Amino acid sequence: MNNQGLTLIKDMVGFGLIALFLFLFFVMDLLGFDPMSLSVPGSWLNVNTIFISIVLEAIPFILLGVFFSALIQTYVSEETIQRFIPKNAIVALVPAALLAVVFPICECAIVPVVRRLIKKGMPLHVGVVLLVGAPVLNPIVLASTYYAFRGNLDVVYGRMGLAFVLSIFIGLIIYLLYQNSNQLRWSRDELLGLQPEVPKVKNRFKSTLYHASDEFFEMGKYLIVGAFVASLFQTFLDRDVLLDLGSSETAAPAVMMAFAYVLSLCSEADAFVAATFGNTFSIGAILAFLVYGPMLDLKNTIMLFAFFRARFVFGLIVVITVSVYCFILLYQAIM
């Protein structure tokens, strides 16, 4: 089936769902149907609540990310990126980590930005530094962490310091494993040069809006899937089991990393959740939660699989997980 046929089917399904919604919205009362009479298990109501909260929390940052991505597409040329990135692959890691400090973008929004930068010519390992560093190091996260842990600045300094060092270390490991090979997932049409282009307009502002809207709808479907999976885990996962496992210094960081992955909190808000574990877990375990979650969670894992090759994503997951866990154990041993 050609692309036109698939597009027609998608449009028909979309219009059908809209028509069904409007019919039920306006006709249910006339038919005497009372939706409150339906018996829905409380757990599924909880899934619905968590799902909506995750989506509503993430959408503003997704919009921010796709808008940044569109600005890069419109105003930043490949030559500009090549000019400002140091030629030495190892030296380029530090400027990338410093750039992550000023990017006000969370873990959901950073995926389209990094993908666009890599398509523009940014080396893969430099993009990974931004991917894992920006969601933790940006000034909004710093402010929220400071506010949540005002009585314990060790958490604030520990989170920022570990994230900075880890972003450079992870970027280095990715460079050693993959060099500058292309790990983006390309569609058949993109490879053949048949991908429909965004309408070319002379007004750069309109061009930015075109790119941002396309990117938003492309990313949004993966956000919805990720949010739904995360809401299922949050509802049906027995947290008491994880809490029991968190009694030892070696197991506690792994438990909190699992929490962070499953909860899929936005990095701008996760510090307030982590603060509630202060009486249960050590500082090292809390730092594991605060550092690992923004780098990798259910939401952005699904997005990564959508836009990068599966083998690379699996490798990235292993590198991030092992690196964070080992650095947290080292932090606990030193402190």
Image (tube, helix red, strand yellow):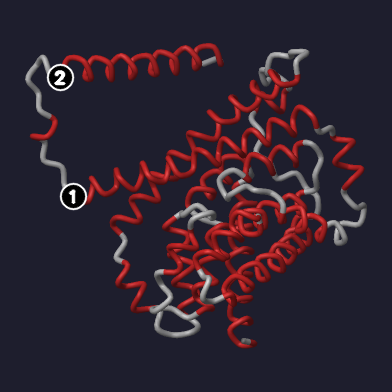
Q: State whether residue 325 is above or below residue 297.
A: below
Distance from disc 2 to disc 1, alpha carbons, whole Å, reads 23 Å
Residues packed near mark 2 inside 10 Å, few (<14), some (14 to 19) or many (20 plus): few
Q: State whether residue 278 is above or below residue 79.
A: below
Residue 42: which numbered mark, if any?
Answer: 1
Q: State whether residue 76 is above or below residue 202.
A: below
Left or right placement of residue 240 versus residue 300 in this view: left
Question: Which three-letter amino acid code belongs to the residue tagged 1?
Answer: Gly
In primary-sequence order, the first of circles 2 and 1 is: 2
**Residue position for label 2:** 28
Q: Check contact, mark 2 vs mark 1: CB within 8 A.
A: no
**Residue at 62% from the left image edge and 81% from the top image edge:** 331
Residue 35: percent from left, percent from top: 14, 30
Which quadrant of the structure image shows residue 65? top right
Left or right placement of residue 98 versus residue 147 in this view: right
Which quadrant of the structure image shows residue 81? top right
Left or right placement of residue 138 versus residue 303 in this view: right
Question: Which three-letter amino acid code belongs to the residue tagged 2?
Answer: Met
Residue 49: percent from left, percent from top: 30, 45
**Residue at 89% from the left image edge and 46% from the top image edge:** 84
Residue 233: percent from left, percent from top: 35, 55
Regarding mark 1 in the picture, which secondary structure is present there? helix
Regarding mark 2 in the picture, which secondary structure is present there? loop
Residue 299: which numbered mark, if any?
Answer: none
